[in-house]
Image (cartoon, helix red, strand yellow):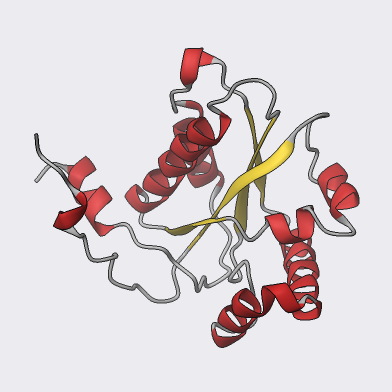
Amino acid sequence: MNEVLKTIKERFSCRDFTGEPLTDDMIKQIADAALAAPSARNLMPWQVIIVTDKSLIDETDDEGVRIMASDPQDKYDFNRISSRGGRMLYNAPCMVIISADPGVSGYVPIDCGILAENIALAAASLGLGSVICGLAAVPLNGPRGAELKKRLRFPAGHEFVISVLVGTAKSKTAPHEPDPGKITYI
Protein backbone atom coordinates (compact mmCIF):
# COMPACT_ATOMS: atom_id res chain seq x y z
CA MET A 1 0.00 0.00 0.00
CA ASN A 2 1.41 3.43 -0.85
CA GLU A 3 2.20 5.92 1.94
CA VAL A 4 -0.72 8.29 1.17
CA LEU A 5 -3.31 5.50 1.37
CA LYS A 6 -1.65 4.14 4.52
CA THR A 7 -1.80 7.59 6.16
CA ILE A 8 -5.49 7.95 5.23
CA LYS A 9 -6.35 4.53 6.66
CA GLU A 10 -4.37 5.05 9.89
CA ARG A 11 -5.46 8.63 10.71
CA PHE A 12 -7.69 8.85 13.78
CA SER A 13 -9.41 11.61 15.71
CA CYS A 14 -7.14 12.32 18.67
CA ARG A 15 -8.85 13.69 21.76
CA ASP A 16 -5.98 13.51 24.25
CA PHE A 17 -2.77 15.36 23.50
CA THR A 18 0.40 15.41 25.60
CA GLY A 19 0.68 19.19 25.25
CA GLU A 20 4.24 18.88 23.92
CA PRO A 21 4.88 21.76 21.48
CA LEU A 22 5.34 21.12 17.78
CA THR A 23 8.66 21.92 16.16
CA ASP A 24 8.93 24.86 13.77
CA ASP A 25 9.51 22.37 10.95
CA MET A 26 6.29 20.49 11.77
CA ILE A 27 4.33 23.74 11.82
CA LYS A 28 5.82 24.77 8.47
CA GLN A 29 4.95 21.41 6.89
CA ILE A 30 1.38 21.64 8.16
CA ALA A 31 1.09 25.21 6.84
CA ASP A 32 2.45 24.11 3.45
CA ALA A 33 -0.09 21.27 3.30
CA ALA A 34 -2.88 23.73 4.10
CA LEU A 35 -1.78 26.04 1.30
CA ALA A 36 -1.76 23.12 -1.15
CA ALA A 37 -5.54 22.59 -0.71
CA PRO A 38 -7.64 23.16 -3.80
CA SER A 39 -10.66 25.47 -3.80
CA ALA A 40 -13.53 26.24 -6.16
CA ARG A 41 -12.36 28.61 -8.90
CA ASN A 42 -9.08 28.84 -6.93
CA LEU A 43 -10.65 31.57 -4.77
CA MET A 44 -8.96 30.33 -1.58
CA PRO A 45 -11.63 31.98 0.59
CA TRP A 46 -9.86 31.13 3.81
CA GLN A 47 -7.37 32.48 6.27
CA VAL A 48 -5.36 29.84 8.13
CA ILE A 49 -4.55 30.95 11.67
CA ILE A 50 -1.99 28.73 13.38
CA VAL A 51 -2.09 29.20 17.14
CA THR A 52 0.71 27.80 19.28
CA ASP A 53 0.28 30.25 22.18
CA LYS A 54 -0.78 27.65 24.75
CA SER A 55 -2.19 30.23 27.15
CA LEU A 56 -4.48 31.60 24.40
CA ILE A 57 -5.57 28.08 23.42
CA ASP A 58 -6.31 27.29 27.07
CA GLU A 59 -8.19 30.57 27.57
CA THR A 60 -10.31 29.82 24.49
CA ASP A 61 -10.91 26.32 25.85
CA ASP A 62 -11.90 27.62 29.31
CA GLU A 63 -14.35 30.10 27.76
CA GLY A 64 -15.95 27.40 25.62
CA VAL A 65 -16.34 24.99 28.53
CA ARG A 66 -17.80 27.79 30.67
CA ILE A 67 -20.37 28.60 27.96
CA MET A 68 -21.32 24.94 27.48
CA ALA A 69 -21.67 24.41 31.23
CA SER A 70 -24.11 27.32 31.51
CA ASP A 71 -26.20 26.50 28.42
CA PRO A 72 -28.90 23.86 28.86
CA GLN A 73 -28.92 23.34 25.06
CA ASP A 74 -25.27 22.23 25.18
CA LYS A 75 -25.58 19.59 27.93
CA TYR A 76 -24.87 16.72 25.52
CA ASP A 77 -21.59 18.25 24.35
CA PHE A 78 -20.72 19.43 27.86
CA ASN A 79 -21.26 15.93 29.33
CA ARG A 80 -19.25 14.40 26.49
CA ILE A 81 -16.38 16.85 27.08
CA SER A 82 -16.56 16.31 30.84
CA SER A 83 -16.26 12.55 30.38
CA ARG A 84 -13.08 13.13 28.33
CA GLY A 85 -11.27 15.22 30.93
CA GLY A 86 -13.19 18.52 30.76
CA ARG A 87 -11.12 20.11 27.96
CA MET A 88 -12.90 20.78 24.67
CA LEU A 89 -9.58 21.47 22.91
CA TYR A 90 -8.05 18.35 24.49
CA ASN A 91 -4.80 19.98 25.68
CA ALA A 92 -3.66 20.49 22.07
CA PRO A 93 -0.47 22.54 21.73
CA CYS A 94 -1.50 23.74 18.27
CA MET A 95 -4.89 24.91 17.08
CA VAL A 96 -5.28 25.64 13.39
CA ILE A 97 -8.29 27.87 12.86
CA ILE A 98 -9.80 28.22 9.41
CA SER A 99 -11.82 31.38 8.93
CA ALA A 100 -13.46 32.66 5.78
CA ASP A 101 -15.64 35.37 4.33
CA PRO A 102 -18.88 33.46 3.73
CA GLY A 103 -19.87 35.85 0.93
CA VAL A 104 -16.91 34.96 -1.29
CA SER A 105 -18.43 31.77 -2.67
CA GLY A 106 -21.15 29.24 -2.05
CA TYR A 107 -18.38 26.65 -1.79
CA VAL A 108 -16.73 28.05 1.35
CA PRO A 109 -17.74 25.12 3.62
CA ILE A 110 -16.54 22.55 1.08
CA ASP A 111 -13.29 24.39 0.37
CA CYS A 112 -12.52 24.78 4.07
CA GLY A 113 -13.36 21.11 4.71
CA ILE A 114 -10.83 20.10 2.07
CA LEU A 115 -8.25 22.37 3.69
CA ALA A 116 -8.95 20.87 7.14
CA GLU A 117 -8.47 17.35 5.78
CA ASN A 118 -5.13 18.37 4.22
CA ILE A 119 -4.02 19.56 7.66
CA ALA A 120 -5.22 16.39 9.41
CA LEU A 121 -3.48 14.15 6.86
CA ALA A 122 -0.28 16.20 7.02
CA ALA A 123 -0.29 15.84 10.81
CA ALA A 124 -0.80 12.08 10.56
CA SER A 125 2.02 11.79 8.02
CA LEU A 126 4.31 13.52 10.55
CA GLY A 127 3.36 11.04 13.28
CA LEU A 128 1.13 13.58 15.06
CA GLY A 129 -2.41 13.26 16.26
CA SER A 130 -5.17 15.59 15.11
CA VAL A 131 -8.88 16.10 15.32
CA ILE A 132 -11.04 18.25 13.08
CA CYS A 133 -12.97 20.25 15.66
CA GLY A 134 -15.99 22.48 15.33
CA LEU A 135 -16.20 23.13 19.08
CA ALA A 136 -14.01 26.24 18.84
CA ALA A 137 -17.17 27.88 17.45
CA VAL A 138 -18.59 27.90 20.99
CA PRO A 139 -16.20 30.52 22.44
CA LEU A 140 -15.64 32.31 19.12
CA ASN A 141 -19.38 32.90 18.71
CA GLY A 142 -19.95 33.48 22.42
CA PRO A 143 -20.02 36.65 24.55
CA ARG A 144 -16.22 37.13 24.25
CA GLY A 145 -16.13 36.06 20.61
CA ALA A 146 -15.27 39.48 19.15
CA GLU A 147 -12.40 39.89 21.62
CA LEU A 148 -11.03 36.39 20.95
CA LYS A 149 -11.32 36.85 17.17
CA LYS A 150 -9.38 40.10 17.44
CA ARG A 151 -6.63 38.42 19.48
CA LEU A 152 -6.59 35.58 16.97
CA ARG A 153 -6.26 38.13 14.14
CA PHE A 154 -9.36 37.15 12.19
CA PRO A 155 -9.50 39.21 8.98
CA ALA A 156 -12.38 41.69 8.75
CA GLY A 157 -15.57 40.00 7.58
CA HIS A 158 -14.30 36.51 8.34
CA GLU A 159 -16.21 33.97 10.39
CA PHE A 160 -15.03 30.80 12.07
CA VAL A 161 -15.48 27.79 9.80
CA ILE A 162 -13.59 24.89 11.42
CA SER A 163 -10.44 24.16 13.38
CA VAL A 164 -7.95 21.33 13.49
CA LEU A 165 -6.22 20.51 16.76
CA VAL A 166 -2.73 19.06 16.31
CA GLY A 167 -0.14 17.59 18.65
CA THR A 168 1.48 14.49 20.00
CA ALA A 169 -1.18 11.93 20.87
CA LYS A 170 -1.16 10.77 24.47
CA SER A 171 -2.64 7.48 23.30
CA LYS A 172 -3.49 6.11 19.91
CA THR A 173 -7.03 5.02 19.19
CA ALA A 174 -8.23 2.92 16.32
CA PRO A 175 -9.43 4.79 13.24
CA HIS A 176 -13.18 4.69 12.73
CA GLU A 177 -14.48 1.49 11.21
CA PRO A 178 -15.15 1.98 7.49
CA ASP A 179 -18.72 1.21 6.40
CA PRO A 180 -18.67 -0.31 2.91
CA GLY A 181 -22.45 0.17 2.79
CA LYS A 182 -21.81 3.90 2.35
CA ILE A 183 -20.46 3.27 -1.16
CA THR A 184 -22.69 2.83 -4.20
CA TYR A 185 -21.15 1.44 -7.37
CA ILE A 186 -22.92 2.18 -10.64
In x, y percent, where is residue 119? 46, 43
Taking 152 as reference, is 176 above or below it? Answer: below
Taking 36 as reference, is 91 above or below it? Answer: below
Taking 168 as reference, is 65 above or below it? Answer: below
Q: Nearer the viewer, residue 141 or 7?
A: 141
Residue occupying image coordinates x 58% and y 60%: 21
Residue occupying image coordinates x 66% and y 20%: 104
Residue occupying image coordinates x 75% and y 67%: 64
In x, y percent, where is residue 154? 78, 37
Q: Residue furthest bottom?
A: 83
In x, y percent, where is residue 123? 42, 50
In x, y percent, where is residue 56? 78, 59
Q: Nearer the viewer, residue 73 or 169?
A: 73
Quadrant position of the C terminus in the picture: top left
Q: Residue furthest top?
A: 41
**7 left or right of 64?**
left
Residue occupying image coordinates x 29% and y 65%: 176
**139 left or right of 125?**
right
Q: Give the number of marks.
A: 0
Q: Give residue 10's quadrant in the image.
A: bottom left
Q: Nearer the viewer, residue 13 or 31?
A: 13
**20 left or right of 124?**
right
